[in-house]
Amino acid sequence: MAIRVMLVDDQVLLRTGFRMVLAAQPDMEVVAEAGDGAEALEVLAGTEVDVVLMDVRMPRLDGVEATRRICAQDDPPKVLILTTFDLDEYAFSALKVGASGFMLKDVPPNELLGAIRAVHSGDAVVAPSTTRRLLDRFSPMLPSTGAEPVSAEVSRLTEREREVMLLVAQGLSNGEIAARLVLSEATVKTHVGRILTKLGLRDRVQVVVMAYESGLVRAGGGGAAAQ
């Protein structure tokens, strides 16, 4: 079955360009479009969508609030944020409310297509190094959640899972974590999956956010405690 994609952007020309790129793919289909977040929510109410390409700066309802409302629904589509500037605070806010990643609007078509496929399969598409730079920059925006409740959640992880979580948050890919811990990449992926399940998180991006919120990783990328 083709990946059902929705385009949400107030620029008609940009949506047209994305639609042409996606229409050429045998495994993708643009099933809906919207010019702002409010219209996107209305359309989604009656349309089956797998992945939403979401602009952030739009009239009426911006992409961050639209993403928050979409991700709060039961079995929501994946949301991939489109932004003009790398390390945009809007992109950061969208990751916080449930987006699976973000891409620059001028990304090469093959990278955009790869990102859509990755998001659809359940992976996050923000490069670990980019996620780390983004969180380092915007870590002062992280809410003060209190050490005890979050630490209690992280304490449910095994020692190995905490180790993997720390390395994910420090910007390492699964392959790099596998090399560091002398494990197979498949084993690392299994650990990441268990971390997601135990902490009730959607994807790798939210693992990084929680690692920062819990103090497991501090701004600058350092671990809070020796492993």
Image (tube, rainbow, N blue to C red):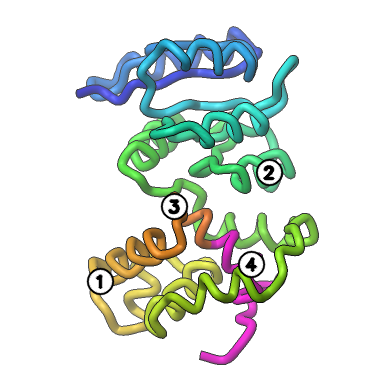
Type of the residue with mark 3: Asp
Q: CA distance from mark 1 to mark 3?
A: 17 Å
Q: Residue at x 64, y 33 (%)?
A: 83
Q: Earlier in the sequence, mark 4 or mark 1?
A: 1
Q: Is residue 179 magenta?
A: no
First in sequence: mark 1 or mark 3?
A: 1
Q: At numbered mark 1, what does the secondary structure look like: helix, strand or loop? A: helix
Residue 9, quarter of picture = top right
Q: Position of residue 20 (x, y in %)?
A: 41, 12
Residue 203's label in the rendered image is 3
User: Residue under circle 1?
Assistant: 187
In depth, the one of 156 and 108 nearer the eye is 156
| Left or right side of 183 for 118 | right
Number of the label disc, if any, that sits on residue 93 = 2
Tags 2 and 4 touching, CB below 8 Å: no
Q: Which residues are magenta?
A: 208-227
Q: CA distance from mark 3 to mark 4?
A: 15 Å
Asked whether the beta carbons under mark 4 and mark 1 sit within 8 Å of each other, the answer is: no
| Picture quadrant of residue 38 | top right
Whole-number angstrom distance, CA of label 4 to CA of label 1: 24 Å
Real-space CA distance between mark 2 and mark 4, rounded to the nearest whole angstrom: 14 Å
Q: Is residue 164 left or right of residue 171?
A: left
Using the image, determine if residue 177 lies above or below residue 43. Answer: below
Instruction: Name the residue tied to disc 4.
Output: 212
Query: Does residue 128 appear left or right of residue 222 in this picture?
Result: left
Task: Where is residue 2? Give x, y as percent.
Answer: 24, 22
